[in-house]
Image (cartoon, rainbow, N blue to C red):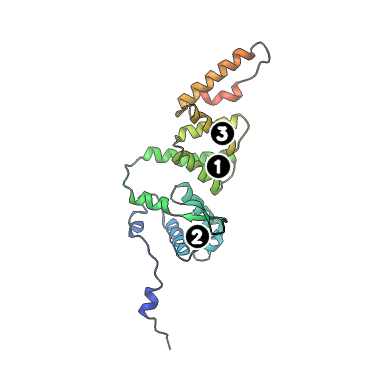
Amino acid sequence: MTKKISIQQILSNQLNIPSILLSKYKSIGLDEKEVMIILQLLRYLEDNNDFPTPYDLSQYVTMNEKECANMLRTLIQKNLLSIEQKENEKHQLSEAYSLNPLWEKMFTQEEDKPDEDQTVGTIFILFEQEFGRPLSPFEIETINAWMDEDEIEPSLIKAGLRESVLMGKLNFKYIDRILREWKKKGIHTVDQARQATKNFHNRKSTKEEKTIKRDTSFYYNWLEGED
């Protein structure tokens, strides 16, 4: 005999999904697989699990663990998902996913900026090409922080990446040091960075022209122009 399901059971097993997610996900560049990952994250959050692993997610979707990990990384790259630190009553720190960036984008009416969005998207691709590997969630958050919190233009971040490559110091700490130094000096565009570095080069050349000659082209090739 089939067991009858009560209305109370159905109502107590509901997931609150903002209808705007279903009506606007396509317009902000999400596909159905990404939406399903978001729905699973919502389910886990309601179950008080705020940092499910890719393996956890893969148990309830048709994607494997690696695909789920890539989906999470893509959502972070699109600035629709973030990782935050939480502190419990015992002052122990833990990480948690937050969908606030998604809701802010959906509920905030903004002017379309296709060129800017495309430029932002290529930043992550460029970093992965230079590092020769996918970026970690922390590295993606670092790039987003440069753009959102420090308000650094993507083109200037690109210049900082190039500078670190040319200096043979390809790591995020060095790039962060470059960008913070430029910000401290009031440098906000690639042209300003180019001019400041040329001035530095000229001063160094004057001081060292009678001592050791150096091949400065290695350090300043990127100043010749943007691709």
The answer, for residue 224, to whether it is visible in the render is no
- Percent across and percent down for residue 50 are 50, 60
At 40% from the left edge and 41% from the top edge, which residue is drawn? 117
Near mark 2 (Cα within 10 A), the count class, few <14, some 14-19 or many ≥20, is some
The circle drawn on residue 85 is none
Q: Image quarter for residue 2?
A: bottom left
Q: Crowdedness of circle 1 by 10 Å Cα count: few (<14), some, many (20+)?
A: some
Please give the name of the residue rendered at 51% of the width and 51% of the height, measured from the top-left corner: 73
Residue 36, percent from left and from top: 44, 60
Q: Which mark is residue 128?
A: 1
- Residue drawn at x 40%, y 77% is 9
Is residue 76 or residue 133 the one in the foreground?
76
Mark 1: which amino acid?
Glu
Left or right: residue 179 compared with residue 209: left
Give 83 or 34, whichever is nearer the viewer: 83
Q: CA distance from mark 1 to mark 2?
A: 27 Å
Tag 2–tag 3 contact (CB < 8 Å): no
Q: Nearer the viewer, residue 103 or 163?
A: 103
Q: Earlier in the sequence, mark 1 or mark 2?
A: 2
Residue 7 seen in render? yes
Q: Residue furthest top?
A: 210
Is tag 2's residue or tag 3's residue first in the polypeptide sequence? 2
Q: Circle 2 is placed at which residue position? A: 50
Residue extending furthest toward the bottom: 1
Give the residue number, with chain letter if any, for mark 3: 177
**Residue type, numbered disc 3:** Arg
Q: CB of mark 1 within 8 Å of CB of mark 3?
A: no
Furthest-right residue in this view? 212
